Amino acid sequence: MTRTAGGGERADLPYRLFGRARGVAPGIHRALGAGLNGAFLRHGSLLDAPDARRIDVRASITDPFGGVKVRRFENRARIDVFVALDLSGSMAFGRAENEDPVADFCAAVAHAALRSQDRFGMIAAGPRPRADLALRATRRAGLPDEIWRKVAQDAGEGRGVAGLLDMLDELPQRRSLVFVVSDFLLPEPDIEELLGRLWRHDVAPIVVRSSAIETRLPRFGLVETRDLETGRRRTVLMRRSLREAWLAHARERRASLDRLFRRHGRPAFDLVDRFDPDAFADHLLSGGV
């Protein structure tokens, strides 16, 4: 395990693509067809796969039809891994210059992709497209640190994700694994559109949350709130009934998101306050990706 430019941890993350990959570039993911670099699959005829290096003498001798048999292997291929990052204003909450869980997560995924022989790419935008933050799938050296700096220096601004929706066209046509990183503080129709437009890809939602506004609320006193997308400020008198209603709303919102994500194929990972690579690895191993 190594560390990012900002001090976050990097680990080899056990992600995988649901179903079989398509491609011919060698990698570690199960792919369609037979290949040369996977587990033994079956025997085949030398006429169908004319490769004398794969002749199985024992299987050929015992073939009742006298055919020459070759070993066929499971195909293993490389995939492209992308992060689709929400950079609307609300995503700036809880992120600091040297303690940025979102930047740590993106850099960790980039590191894991390169370690797995895959390529990593990114699109990031809020209400307007951000071509300067678009990165085509690559295996360039130094990529994780580059990703960390780009994400940490641009916490987000504005309202909505119209720009991110526009940039989804930058993703390749070939099926890829796409981590959608957002607080998902959006109307449900907008979230449905975002996930629906990624139908050809394997989508893994990452919900960015803060305990400061979900669980660590004061029991009584004046609390100043600010909408990071509009800039509007409001002072409220926190009391027991309001606190309980606030917490109940947070729980219901998360449950509603979970139902929505499961309709689109997989549960989400909660990125709360800091990126914990061990918790994320457990999520992946339990079937999250």
Image (cartoon, rainbow, N blue to C red):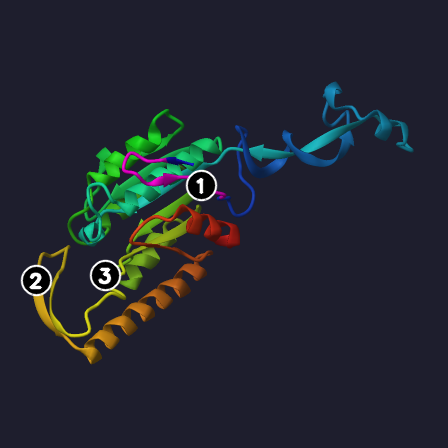
Residue at numbered disc 3 = 212
Identify the residue at horizontal 8%, vertical 66% (top origin). Answer: 234
**Who comes first in sequence, dot 1 or dot 2?**
1
Residue at numbered disc 1 = 176
Q: Gap in Å between the C-alphas at discs 3 and 1?
A: 34 Å
Q: Secondary structure at mark 2?
A: strand
Res. 199 in view: no
Q: Which mark is residue 220?
A: none
Whole-percent x, y for residue 225 in the image:
12, 63
Give the residue type that dot 3 points to: Ala
Magenta-drawn stretch contains 11 = yes
Seen as rendered, the residue at the extreme bottom is 241
Q: Which residues are magenta?
A: 3-14
**Who comes first in sequence, dot 2 or dot 3?**
3
- Between circles 2 and 3, the one closer to the viewer is 3
Mark 1 is surrounded, within 10 Å at the Cα level, by few (under 14), some (14 to 19) or many (20 or more) other residues, namely many
Position of 272 relative to 29 (above/below): below
Q: Secondary structure at mark 1?
A: loop
Give the residue type that dot 1 points to: Ser
Q: Nearer the viewer, residue 68 or 124?
A: 124
Magenta-drawn stretch contains 277 = no
Identify the residue at horizontal 11%, vertical 57% (top origin). Answer: 230
